[in-house]
Image (cartoon, coloured by chain):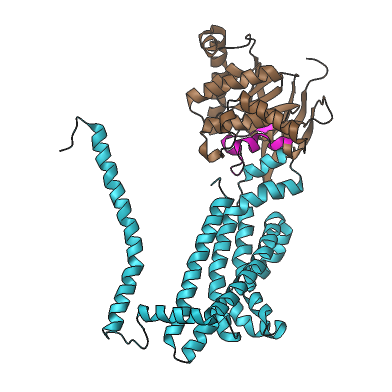
Chain colours: A brown, B cyan
Amino acid sequence: MSPNPKISIHELTKVFYKKKNSVTALENISLDIEEGEFVCLVGPSGCGKTTLLRILAGLENQSSGAFKIERSGEDRPNQSMVFQERGVLPWLTVEENVAFGLKMRHLPKSHVKERTNYFLNKVGLAKFTKMYPKELSGGMKQRVSIARAFANDPEILLMDEPFGALDEQNKYILQEELLSIWSETKKTVLFITHSIDEALYLSDRVLLMSAQPGKILAEIKIDLSRPRKLEDIRSNSEISSKFLDIWRHLQVEVQRSRL
Amino acid sequence: MKDIKNPIETEKREWRKQQTQLRLKTWLTIFSPISLLLIWQFLSQSGLIDARFFPPPTAIISTFIDLLTSGELFHNINISLFRIFAGFLLGVIPGIIIGLCMGLYAPFRHFVSPVVMALMPIPTLALLPIILIIFGIGEVSKVVTIAGSVFFPVVINTAAGVISIDSIYLDVAKNYGASRKDFILKIALPGSLPVMLEGIQMGQAIALLTIVAAEMMGARSGIGYLIWTSYSAFLLKEMFVGLILISFFGYIFSLLLRWLQRKLIPWR
């Protein structure tokens, strides 16, 4: 580990308190993520992975502990989030949605226009700029969401199960597109998913989480060369054994949380 | 039996059948008011209903033309339309502003909503005597009366519209660092617009109800005044002209607002 990780999380704890009842969603989470690393956080639903992401996104406050995002430029936003399926604003056109972050930062018009067009082209939405989200398919909406986050040029990207609601074919296509944009921009990404396949295909490192209290159980390195092909992942025996490894871990967790 | 060999021909026939049914429905919609008028005409002329109370539509139309050419009707329509528009704006604009504030600032909402809830059930018309005392018998009192009744549906719907915005859009705004001003203009206002416009639609209907009653009680002009004086003088043809005018304007206004709705929320 380098002395200056991009994201460093130190003993982060989040407790939800309601009417004398407290639930520990996250317990003493400590982890570092390197500059340019793609990390997937995998765990059963309700394990607090979304809570962790929301804390990093500034949408929720931790109960104790701290985290730090290493900054590289003054005028760059700390992070941008790609939300689950409904995160696209229905009253803005595709173009306005992609430009949203840049406009909120009141950047010069020409810059906003240039960045927006660049990423609209990247995700193949150049023909749909004037359309409203209601006219788009689920996959296209998520492309808008991804373009919006990349166009904002943040220090790190946070993704909250962005492909969870898509059908299999669309999911593979979008994963591939995401990797292609990511390899160009070299962003640091923290990606949440419950799909083991998705995690193995996308990430440099998979973190496994347990439920209640949410803890990091294990970390698994995926040292496959990039660009990756889905076929390679499926036929690689080492990856298959990693799949089973993660699968067993999660099985235990799911069984435990049922009791 | 269906022609199995030619599926396109089968669907074509099915499509034609649906089109005919659609056209039939449009005709029914047009036919309904016309048939009502025809029945009215027949009953009134044949003496089955008292023509003094229900003059035949043809007589009402000729009275309408007489009133129109004398210029009297124009004056009354103008003054009523002015009152409706002025009162409508005076009710809608504060309604939107206060409604937005209620939706955006929870302490303000908790402070103001009991007052709004307590005042809402009081018909503005019941307050007309007080309004006349405060604002005099001039135009202002009528405008204020209409504004008072338009205000409530607008304020309540605007506040509800802001509160009902999906929390994920609030997260998006926060995550992308929207300022307070940007949040209001880019999230709260467009997000609450559909529900707000429903409230404005309701306000428009209430404005028409109010104007007639207000002009009956404390005015010397307007469509409501025409209805009331005609009734008092037993000029029922003139009274019917007034009633039909109100129904006509109500229809026109709701069409206008529907059009505005389509223009303002193209994303729906």
Residue B267 in view (yes/no)? yes
Seen from the viewer's position, the closer of residues B243 and A116 is B243
* A47, above or below A232, in the image: below
Q: Residue furthest front?
A: B69
Q: Is residue A239 magenta?
A: no
* A231, above or below A64, in the image: above
Seen from the viewer's position, the closer of residues A241 and A137 is A137
Q: Is residue A97 magenta?
A: yes
Give percent across and percent down for residue B102: 69, 59
Q: Residue furthest bottom?
A: B233
Give percent across and percent down for residue A251: 53, 24
Residue drawn at point x = 54 percent, y = 65 percent: B202
Q: Residue furthest left?
A: B1
- Residue range in magenta is A81-102
Residue drawn at point x = 53 percent, y = 28 percent: A255
In the picture, measured across the screen, residue A178 lies left or right of residue B32, that is: right
In the picture, measured across the screen, residue A73 lies left or right of residue A80, that is: right
Give percent across and percent down for residue A226: 63, 11
In the picture, measured across the screen, residue B133 lies left or right of residue B247, that is: right
Residue drawn at point x = 66 percent, y = 16 percent: A204
Residue A14 in view (yes/no)? no
Q: Quadrant of residue B16?
A: top left
Number of disc labels: 0
Q: Quadrant of residue B65?
A: bottom left
* A208, above or below B16, in the image: above
Give percent across and percent down for residue A104: 74, 39
